[in-house]
Image (spheres, grey):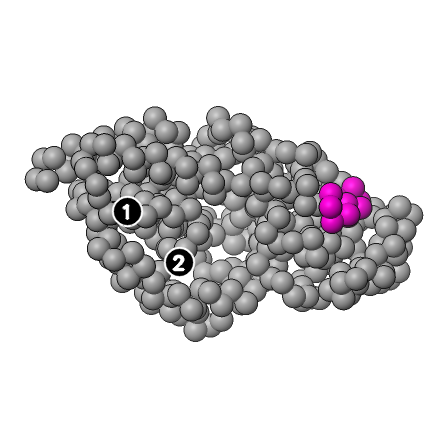
Amino acid sequence: MNITDLQALATDIKTWGAELGFQQVTIADIDLEHYRPYLEDWLRKHYHGEMLYMERHAELRLRPQELVPDTLRAICVRMDYAQSSRNTLAELQSPDMAYISRYARGRDYHKLIRKRLQKLADRITEASGPFGYRAFVDSAPVLERALAEKSGMGWIGKNTMLINSKAGSWFFLAELFTDLPLPVDSAGEDHCGSCRACLDACPTNAFVGPNILDARRCISYLTIELRTAIPEELRPLMGNRVFGCDDCQLVCPWNKFTRLTSVDDFTPRHGLDQASLLQLFQWDEETFLRLTEGSAIRRIGYECWLRNLAVALGNGPGTPEVITALKARRSDASALVREHVEWALQQHAARPAGPTSAG
């Protein structure tokens, strides 16, 4: 295939991607050596915490051609998931309500996006004949934000999120690695400037500096990736956040350009955008499994779900109903749950009764 054919194919790929519901399709080469010192320094300082897979597969992240032999390009896509253009911390000021990260309130995005990527690959095959490819949706050692940045989709902001100047950061990323030598797009520029709203807003001071996140202090890590006890000194800072944390995105000025999704699957399910902590804490395991079917929440398991909720209840109002619910879990089969329940009860015993702030 000559350069003219490849250029035409790249243009078609972007058109087909838009038809499949992707808000943007860009193409990057796979030379990630620029990012090597940053990743290696981050790992050396153990900022990845218990995410040992980050260290174990570091070289695969930096060398896509070793993950998928013969890879030459990464076709990067993004899909918006925001349900509201109102970026506010108000939900964090209701200490009896559960805060669940916006991306996880609807159906799990992995299968939906993977199916669309497969359809895109099928369209490419129809046009160019069989070619080598592999689709990734947060499912393998891929430096997806680095590739997206290289492809001109946006820039990696001080909060380590990919930011797009026309759409903010409320979107999912995915990639199609290919052996087609497609023309690549130009990387954009960093537009964070002197702004440090995200760094200042972090409840646990997880940002060591601009673009450097110590995951061990990040609430998303603590509530999703960590499978052991949450460090006691960080628990009071978590407020009512029980699955993930959006603070650094909620305060980002670029999210004034938030674009709403048209994908019904991303609509909040089972009232997870307005559920009380007490209501969720009273789910039994069967209810948890039933109501988190097809949800990103299920991956943390029932035990960590209760752990997170116990912390949030310890940070919230010590109503009689809350105290009763916590005491009922004192004999839970899980030592992890029992530990966090006792911590929550100690918090209430140590302060006067009445509402407290979860912000």
Left or right of 341 in this view: 126: left
Which element carries disc 2, helix, strand or loop?
loop
**Is residue 189 among what the camera can see?**
no
Left or right of 67 in this view: 319: right
When asked about the image quadrant of residue 30, the answer is bottom left
User: Residue at coordinates 35% horizontally, 38% vertically from top-left?
Assistant: 118
> Which amino acid, by three-letter code, is at mark 1?
Tyr
Asked whether residue 279 is drawn in magenta, I would say yes
Q: Earlier in the sequence, mark 1 or mark 2?
A: 1
Residue 199 in the image, given as x and y percentages of width and height: 52, 54
Circle 2 residue = 141
User: Residue at coordinates 68% horizontally, 41% vertically from top-left?
Assistant: 290
Residue 64 in the image, given as x and y percentages of width and height: 29, 57
**Is residue 221 among what the camera can see?**
yes
Asked whether residue 305 is drawn in magenta, I would say no
In the displayed orientation, state which residue is furthest to the bottom. Answer: 44
User: Residue at coordinates 34% horizontally, 63% vertically from top-left?
Assistant: 60
Figure label count? 2
- Magenta span: 277-287
Circle 1 residue = 133
Is label 1 or label 2 in front? 1
Residue 326 in the image, given as x and y percentages of width and height: 84, 54
Left or right of 175 in this view: 104: right
Q: How many residues crowd mark 1 within 10 Å: few (<14), some (14–19), many (20+)?
A: many
> Which amino acid, by three-letter code, is at mark 2?
Pro
Q: Main secondary structure of the magenta part?
A: helix
Q: CA distance from mark 1 to mark 2?
A: 16 Å
